[in-house]
Amino acid sequence: MSAAEAGPRPGAPEDGVPDHEVLVIGAGFSGIGTAVGLLRAGIDDFLVLDEQDDVGGSWHANRYPGVAVDISAFSYSFAFEPHPAWSRAFPPGAELKAYADHCVDRYGLRSRLRLNSRVVRAGYHEDGHLWEVLLADGTALTARFVVCATGWLTRPKTPELAGLDRFAGPVVHTARWDASLDLRGRRVAVVGTGASSVQLVPEIAPSVERLDVYQRTPTWVFPKPDLPVPAAVRGVFARAPWTQRAVRLATDTATELSFVIAMIHYRRFPFLVRTGEALSRLYLRQQVGGDRELMDALAPAYRLGCKRPSFGKGYWRAFTRDNVRLVTDPIERITAGGVVTADGTERAADVLVLATGFHVLDNLPPFPLSGQGGRELGEFWASERFQTYEGSSVKGFPNLWFIVGPYSFTGGSWFGMIDYQVTHLLRVIGEARRRGATQAVVRPERHDASFAKVLRRQRDTVFADASCRGTNSYYFDRHGDAPAVRPASTYEAAWRARSFDLDDYRYERVRSDGSAAVPDTVAPDATAPDTAAPGTTAPGAGHPEGARHATA
């Protein structure tokens, strides 16, 4: 049995000193934002782990034709690091990857990265208040605090299709694209009509001989105002950053008003959702002309918001091409030379493209993770429903925070979420440091109150609408909850991160001999700052017992 298979060692390090004060798992934008926040809060003893060979997360892994951001880049970027050089309002994926590289270099994070390091297990040592994280190569690292910044779109979902392994041609998932694959003049079958398909289909349609798109559930699509950013405007952004911040405020507000508010306050303002649906149907009519049969096949029968909507450039119009077919009959099986649907029709294909998305809720956590009493987090969530305190921490799992976990994302700005989640965890770590505490764990009653509030609010969201059932939306879990979305605006979530009571956590410290924990009887320094958010000064006290550095 390998070290990775064996699980965490039975005891904490003999000297009780962790390899690092903080381990950040994930080097996508969530991990980058966490690392920058730690530095700006004066916490410099941390290491960022990632299983890939470079930074960027989804923007490093996803390279399919047409891949691009589907929210304005003025919002899809860090507020503390505006990027004046975007070529377009919705730039291609390569620019997002370059932006990730820029942020890593700008803040000197390369030396704090450990790439090609897949985490296979993590366990909490209660006697020493330490996390032990095991990597696939058998390495074990310890840390006082752990931040899970693994994101959502990391584990591609392969559909369970009979005969898939017998297909004679190339089979490629959009998240694992083969750059050497040439689709020109070939018969291509695309399975799936989600966000990646909306980008891929219009990109490849003009060059392939035949394109069959297999649809299980239609997608709400809106026109993508993907305008180029003139050089003169980029120059203004570079010389006067406040102008770009003003544009960001406008795009953030538009997103909150047009989607987030409509989604979470559906019962109060149902007309907002219906207005969005009417606009999308108008766009559909403009794209496909008077083809009523095609319109009916492409128009969703569920409320806008039940599934993730998309912004497209020519997706619906692609189905009016002579070489493109929309197939709505369920797939029965895959053969060596094509796809057979439930009506018995076999359609020939040379290449099979799986645009079938990712494991999202069933990838939380992305590896076995055991807390107090040896309780495994995945088992806890499976048996007692996905739940968190403020979308960030979980009762019984000390010194651990999620950037993207249950009820963390509001559906608005992804980077806004990163900011408020980092603010939350830095406030707690800062408070633990000021108290000389080695453990911070959310109080069960405060955790439960937070979860109860989320469930109450869900009753007013679009997710409670009966039309959401059967949509195969990754927003929902097997309990019928929608833990992928926090029923709050981004602005409210940010305010909560800055104002929640720090005593919602219980703080303890290990005795000097490591034998037992001591409650938080030491009052915090009244002169020390009470937050450790990005951009603030460092916490008043240093790390309680120092830390040693492992070689990265």
Image (cartoon, rainbow, N blue to C red):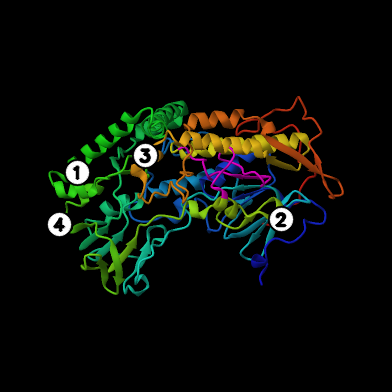
Which mark is on residue 465? 3
Q: Which residues are magenta?
A: 384-410
Q: Is tag 3's residue or tag 2's residue first in the polypeptide sequence? A: 3
Instruction: Classify mark 4: residues with Cα within 10 Å, few (<14), some (14-19) or many (20+).
Output: few
Q: Is tag 3's residue or tag 1's residue first in the polypeptide sequence? A: 1
**Amino acid beneath label 4:** Asp
**Amino acid beneath label 3:** Asp
Return the residue at label 4: 322
Q: Is tag 4's residue or tag 3's residue first in the polypeptide sequence? A: 4
Instruction: Classify mark 3: residues with Cα within 10 Å, few (<14), some (14-19) or many (20+).
Output: some
Instruction: Classify mark 1: residues with Cα within 10 Å, few (<14), some (14-19) or many (20+).
Output: many
Return the residue at label 1: 287
Q: Is tag 4's residue or tag 2's residue first in the polypeptide sequence? A: 4
Residue 457 percent coordinates (x, y):
48, 33
Which mark is on residue 550? 2
Q: Nearer the viewer, residue 184 or 480?
A: 480
